[in-house]
Amino acid sequence: MSLLFMNKKILVFLFALLAQNVFGQRQLKLIAEMPDCKKEQFLLLRGDEGGVYVVDQAEVNENGLLSISWNGDYGFYRLSGKLGKIDFLISKADFHFSLIGKPEVGELRFPEEDENNQFQYYLSEFEIRNSKMTEIRETLEKMNEQDSSFKDLHTQFAKVQKEKRNLLKELWRNHFDSWSVRMALAQQELLPNLKQKGLKYDEYYQKHFFDYFAFTDTVLQATPIYYEKIGKYLQSQKIDELLENENYKKISDAIGKLFWLTELEPSSQKYLANYLMIRYPEHEYPQMRQIVVDSYKVLNTCEYVLANRIIQNRIRNSRNNKAGWLVPDVDLKNSLDIRIQSLSDVNSDLTLLVVWSGTCIHSKEMLEQIRDLYPEYHDLGLEVVAVSLDSNLNYWREMVSQNYYPWVNACDTQGLNGSLANQFNIYVTPSMFLIDPSLKTIAVPITFFQLENELSQYFK
């Protein structure tokens, strides 16, 4: 009986896990006491692979309470209203806090022992010094250096600036293992020293913008702060102005630098690429999209040989691989399905062609993700054709067998010198193409996030 009872408990536990992970996310609830914000509307925001999105919105009622319930995950959220924003980390299903005053300048209180209290304390310490420095600086810029009070005021500015610098150093060195410190540091903006004559704020900002911010920090990734930081960087580089003037050389330099700041960390680059391509849609900014795609592919894919003239030509030609392109009906060499020897043999409403390599870690990660969604979309009419560029057939067959790739598998052992790579202008793996029955390209997704979006739109 005891064994039976234990087995039942295990089954109940497993079902609970399945229900949470498969059938839905956690049921979360936020209650905020905001007596000074009655009748004000707030948006609850969250970040994901593509940027910041709205979870829900609500109005503070006549009793000064704001209440929002939703299905979601624990993590970093933002409440945004007309008069400011409130950032916080939710770590339990029923989450609450209170605000006396208005956002940004009010007094926030979270439950005892909640690290959000420490986070808000650090933010307030920085805010006091930032406000004071800005106030003094604006006054000094209007004064004549010969004024008797100029020197005293300049000394005050230097004193406050030193206080802030010491606070930054102390937190960075001694408390960086705390998420509250990392989040607070990530939001700090810098002001140039008044002694640095001729140095504009934008120049100083660009130089020091990422001193206390790491794109690779898993706590920061895909939070509103993360994307806000990218947006401010783009603003400091005057990207919109450069787009108006069609100065794509400077845009390319700025975007390339931004990708290098991710320290070659794959997930950071995916977040960045998705965000940029959503912010600058292809139909409005085709050149911008190509700059982003080129920057992303060079840093976050495999099998590229930039010194090779053939590959360089292929990179240029690949810019024609976009929606509407009629793809060549290539032979699927070494196909494991004898019925399917070319693309036109595939009988599906939509075909995903994936060109990959077993030596490319990004390819293997992409195929694992595609394998997870394959059953659902295969039932709707999707077929996947995965063509490897591996030169060793035995190695490729073992990879396919071990990982159970349940779709059409083929291998062009000539690799980047083969007919498929040549006709599709392939210069990196993985490369993906969504193709309709007439062999017309529906989309050329770069990341898995984009692939999911395209599939959900096509089969909705």
Image (cartoon, helix red, strand yellow):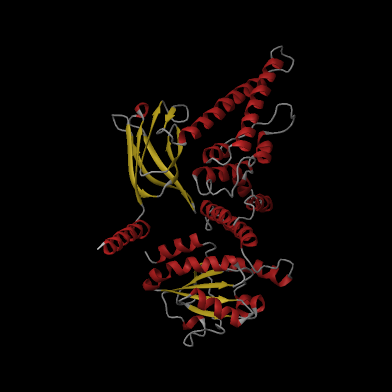
Q: Is residue 430 above or below residue 165?
A: below
Residue depicted at 53% across the width and 31% down the height: 122
Q: Residue 455: x and y, percent? A: 43, 65
The tally of labels here is 0
Q: Is residue 80 above or below residue 227?
A: above
Q: Is residue 458 left or right of residue 356?
A: left
Q: Is residue 113 above or below residue 318?
A: above
Q: In the displayed image of the protein, which residue is found farthest to the front?
A: 2
Q: Residue furthest top?
A: 148
x and y percentages locating residue 147 in the rendered image: 71, 13
Q: Please give the name of the residue rendered at 42% of the width and 77% of the height, measured from the top-left corner.
A: 348
Q: Position of residue 389 (x, y in %)?
A: 61, 76
Residue 43: name its quadrant: top left
Tell me which corner region of the image, top left, top right, bottom left or bottom right, holds residue 418: bottom right
Q: Residue at x 61, y 48 (%)?
A: 244
* The residue positioned farthest toward the bottom in the image shown: 338
Task: Provide residue 132's location: percent of width, then percent of height.
Answer: 59, 23
Q: Does residue 141 show up?
A: no
Left or right: residue 343 versus residue 31 is right
Which quadrant is home to the N terminus?
Answer: bottom left
The C terminus lies in quadrant: bottom left
Q: Decide if residue 30 is in sight here.
A: yes
Residue 457: name its quadrant: bottom left
- Who is closer to the viewer here, 153 or 254? 153
